[in-house]
Image (cartoon, rainbow, N blue to C red):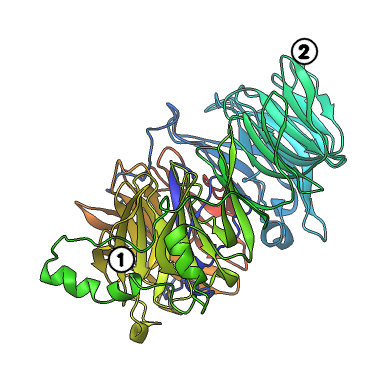
Amino acid sequence: MSPAGRVVMTMHQNEEKGNRAAAAVVFALAGAAIAWCASGGVSGRTALYGPGTVKATSSVAAMEEEPEPVVWYEDDGLYIYQPGRQEKTKLTGLKDGGMDRMTLFFSEKNPADLTLVLPDRTGAYYLKDLTTDYIGVTRGDLWYSTIPGKGKQPEEMPVAEKVLSSRLLPDGSLVWLDDNTSFWILSGTPGEKGTEPRKIAAGVKEYYISSEEPEVFLVCESGKAYYFRKDTGKQVVAEGVKTVDHVSDDLRKIYYRTENKDLFYEEVPGLPQVIDVDVEEVAVVKKTGSIYYLKENREIEPVPSGTQTGLPPADKTELTPEEEELVNLRIEELLQQLGGGAGEDGTEEQAAETGAAPASGYQLNYFDGTAHKGLLKGVSGVDTNHLDELENDRAIVYTGEAYGHGVWLMMGAKPLYTGLSAADEGLMDLCPDAVRDVLYVSRQREDQIGSPDQGGIYAMHYTEKGFTNPEPLFAGAVIISAARDGKVYAGTYPLPDEGSTLIVDGEKISPHVASFFWDENGVSEDLQIYRNVFYQDYYVSGDVAAWSKEGGIRPVAYNVREYHGFKDGSFTMLCDYDEDEMKGTLVYWDGKGDPEVLSGQAAGTRAGDGEK
């Protein structure tokens, strides 16, 4: 997850993450397969940019000495603004307004989002004359422009034609994939003597760049994979690659599968090792590089009796009257055997008592980079919603038919039975703490199912010996979006035209929330909130507010069509967007002072961290 994690107030069961490299955290609903859309009403279309007096959301200090540059495009060209220097530069002119509706809404790409600014801010690469074909593939001509500073004109020069994508390596070298799927590199500044593009490989279908060194991992249509370094060149590191399941940010840990579903692991550069065969699904804990994977059932060594928990042990802690009342909402059902899941043969009871899972479904396995182990049989799925956030190897796993029965928590290679059932309609959501050994659970009474704010949040602490009794935390929420170091971000589920109420540790922050940025390191309690969102066809409008524990809610901008957050805590917002003219007002906010209007004619801007 990115340093400033974007949380979307929408519930999906086991939603596919896709290419959310620094992924957005999505509310997961364990007990139902219903998707709810967050929406709300706003009145009027007059822009108001309120005071931004709250510190920006950022989980790390500013990554660079200078603030993030802002890139956007208008009818007449592509622009860059450098907040630290207070400099606005027009990099290039664009033909025919630079885009068309198909480019924006079908490929979801635009000239600003495809612009790469050099780390030293002396130049930028961008694509001009963008076209999008009928299957949504966008291509354009790659250009370079200097960023000379105030009073000087930028120098523009072509680099390559018909480019599909481009990236910058940490040393500022440019790599790109052309229309013929050939992969190229350019070291040095375009136009310099001796600086010529160099072709690295042909037939490339995907590539990954290192976050630390000038290195690239390439996968070709032929199934061959290459590891490229600027100083040593290209070397084959794998063959028969069909699916890449994970590449670490530093390119050192790579998981991939072959056409025959053989799962390989490689610490690049090195020799690939076979982890297992006939692998169906892979779930990666991004920050540790360990994986949980599913394959067809086969005989495995059963987990010894007593190493997993049955029902949570009795907890003799006395509760206050308020706590006891909250517990009574659902405590008995939390501690019941899997509601409706146990058959006459008692297979679910045996699972609780002996550690054996039902025989149907998949076999769950674990690999931590050194050894793999079979964990459970009868597994129907692994919940991947929070894997990008976790600091330790943890995963929520379901056994039984179609997520209908037992809920387990993997603690490394140790399966722990929670005593919960996904078939129980009262179980609304599950979320592990990213740091602590706590599982958060939301519940509703059966007579309150469907009520957006009638539910309770509980904490279930655990060790290798099992779970404690659920500890009531607060009421009024049914969704748990994220949790870190004891701080729980929760909410009501969104209803049409009402949105969702955001709740942090039991405190109601704001109603009608669509999404928000939060500090995943727990350093600050500040949030940036997108709320009161109104959708009609292509028209979208909401408002952005900031919240802190000390200062409460502070307005930042209204009539916001889209907003983006960056690592240094800054934000850009496109406001007052006119769908007929396809332009609006671009606002920059550093998270501390007042928002600043950069342009009244902006057609699109660069996406933030974790949004591409």
Up-down relation of residue 116 to residue 456 (above or below): above
From the image, state whether disc 1 or disc 2 is nearer to you.
Answer: 1
Q: Is residue 145 visible?
A: yes
| Residue 331 locus on image (x, y percent) | 28, 72
Secondary-structure class at tag 1:
strand
Up-down relation of residue 89 to residue 346 (above or below): above
* Residue at horizontal 42 percent and vertical 76 percent from the top: 41
Indicate the amino acid at tag 2: Lys
**First reached walking from the N terminus: tag 1 or tag 2:** 2
Q: Nearer the viewer, residue 546 or 20?
A: 20
* Residue at horizontal 74 percent and vertical 50 percent from the top: 278
Apparent side of residue 312 relative to residue 74 in the rendered image (left or right): left
What is the count of numbered marks? Answer: 2
**Few, some or many residues within 10 Å of mark 1 (<14, 14–19, 20+):** many
Mark 2 sits on what residue? 193
Q: What's the distance in space between the residues labelled 1 and 2, CA to CA?
A: 64 Å
| Residue 378 locus on image (x, y percent) | 59, 63
Q: Which image quadrant for residue 229?
A: top right
Up-down relation of residue 16 to residue 94 (above or below): below
Q: Which image quadrant for residue 168?
A: top right
| Residue 265 locus on image (x, y percent) | 67, 35
Mark 1 sits on what residue? 457
Q: Nearer the viewer, residue 509 or 374?
A: 374
Secondary-structure class at tag 2:
loop
Q: Is residue 10 visible?
A: no
| Residue 76 locus on image (x, y percent) | 66, 48
Indicate the amino acid at tag 1: Ile
Q: Nearer the viewer, residue 25 or 237?
A: 237
Q: Which numbered disc covers residue 71?
A: none
* Residue at horizontal 32 percent and vertical 58 percent from the top: 460
Q: Nearer the viewer, residue 585 or 3?
A: 3
